[in-house]
Structure formats: structure tokens, C-alpha cells
Image (spheres, grey):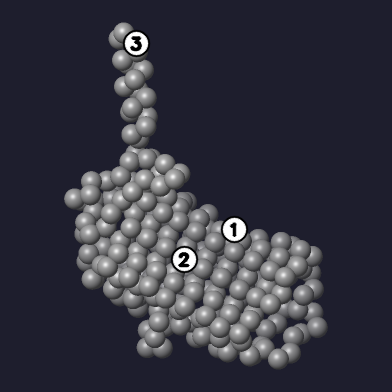
Amino acid sequence: MKLLLLIFCLTISSCLSDDNICPSSEDIKPCSCSIGVDNRPSISCEGLESVDDLKKAMKGMQDFKFSNFYIEKSNIGILPSDIFSDIEVRFMNILFTNLTSLSESLNMPAFLGLESTLEYLQIRDAFITEETPLIRISLSHLKKLQYLQLEGNVIPTIGNDWFESGPYRLKQLYLMDTYTKKVGSHAFSSLSELRRFSLTGGSVSEIVRDMFPSQATYLETLDFSNNKISVLPKDIFSRMPSLNEVF
């Protein structure tokens, strides 16, 4: 009987490990936590009125591991670069939330602390005016990042420095409806594992082969739709053996 009780207690303890429990709902207000289909906790923060609301909620999440983290329909302004440094997140989604910067300065990387956990990052409709565009993003430290989607953000220029140091494991990059006018001559050349790429909804008039890896071995899809490109360089699709879709 004692042995059965011990096994039962150990089973319960295992099920309630830090990997699959939520923090106290009181401690993370106004955010909320739920257990997803993967049996992992996910966070939803909706309607935050300021970055202070987010900072307050983050204090109650320290040392927790989350599958998904959503910030939606909120007003954040400057997102502190280390605000997620005390948690683990695999999938980060910032949607329809007013942002003016992803860190305190242009030279400071965003999402510090998520270097070894973040695999998926979506920022949608966050930098929505010409007065507060997304000027630069530094994500090379996010070693596990494989998916990046920046949709509905005003990004006038994508410079060569955006991805010159990675993240090297990035496989899918979607820059959709970004109002981009100019792209650096080798802006994406370091992303050797890239498979799907979109740069749509801007006024880009020129692209060159050097924008992409010299050996784009895995690149399957290129999408430049809804831009102002009239002529393609003769070599634009060279050394892309896996390419099967172009828009």
C-alpha cells in the first residue's frame, strides 16, 4: 500500500513539474495562462495599457517555461530588451500592438534571455506609422530561431546589417506588407538554411542575386509580389537547386 502511494505521489509530482504548470493567475494579471494541446502552458496578454502592465505580469512568471506567448491589442511603446530574460518561450507572437522599438537602443539586441529557446517569432501590425517605423532588428543571438514573420509593419529599409550575423538557422522569413523601399545588396546572404522567403507589399524596384546566399541550396519559395520590380537580373535564380515557386 505504501509503495502504491509512493508511486502515485511521484506520478503526480511528475505531472505537475515546472514544464507543464501555469503560474498563479493573481501573480500575472492582467495576463492569463492556459495549458495547450501540447500539455504546455501558454501566456496571453491582451489589452495592456502600457509596458508597466507587462513588467508587472512578468514578475509572476519568473523561471517558468512557456510554449506560446501572445501579446495582443496592447500599447507597449519601447519593449525592454531583457523583459523576457527570466522565462523560456518557444513561440512568441506580438499582434496588433503598438511598438516604437524592440529595445532601448538600436545597438541592443531584442528578446535577450531567449537565445536557446525561441524558435518562432511573429510581430504583426506593431510598427504601423511612418513616424514610428521598424528601423532595425538584431536577432543573431537567437540561435534556435527558425521562423520570422514581420507582417503589416512599416519597414522603409532593410539594411545589410539586419541579418549579416544570422540567425543562421532561420528557415522561413516573411516580410509581408512592409512598405519597404530599399533592400541592402546582400541583406539575406548569411541565411544559408533559408527555405521560404517573402518580401511583399512595398515599392522595391530592384533585386540582385547577391541578396541571397551564394549557394541557396535549400531555398524553395521566393515571393516579391506587389512591389515595383520590372526587370529581373539574368542570374537571379542561379545556384538555387530547390527553387520551385516564384511569385
Foreground disc of the pair 1, 2:
2
Q: Position of residue 234 (x, y in %)?
A: 80, 83
How far apart in space, not on screen, are marks 1 and 2 (Cα)?
Answer: 16 Å
- Give the residue at mark 3: 3
**Numbered circle sitting on residue 122:** 2
Q: Amino acid at mark 2?
A: Gln
Q: Position of residue 91 (x, y in %)?
A: 45, 56
Q: Is residue 230 visible?
A: yes
Residue located at (59% from left, 77% from top): 199
Q: Position of residue 26 (x, y in %)?
A: 19, 50
Is 56 situated above or below 226? above
Circle 2 crowding by C-alpha within 10 Å: few under 14, some 14–19, many from 20: some
Q: Earlier in the sequence, mark 1 or mark 3?
A: 3
- Mark 1–mark 3 CB contact (< 8 Å): no
In terms of secondary structure, where does tag 2 sit? strand
Outermost residue, front side: 37
* Quarter where residue 240 is shown: bottom right
In terms of secondary structure, where does tag 3 sit? helix
**Numbered circle sitting on residue 169:** 1
Q: Earlier in the sequence, mark 2 or mark 3?
A: 3
How far apart in space, not on screen, are marks 2 and 3 (Cα)?
Answer: 48 Å
Q: Amino acid at mark 1?
A: Arg
Q: Amino acid at mark 3?
A: Leu
Q: Position of residue 133 (x, y in %)?
A: 42, 83
Q: Is residue 210 visible?
A: no
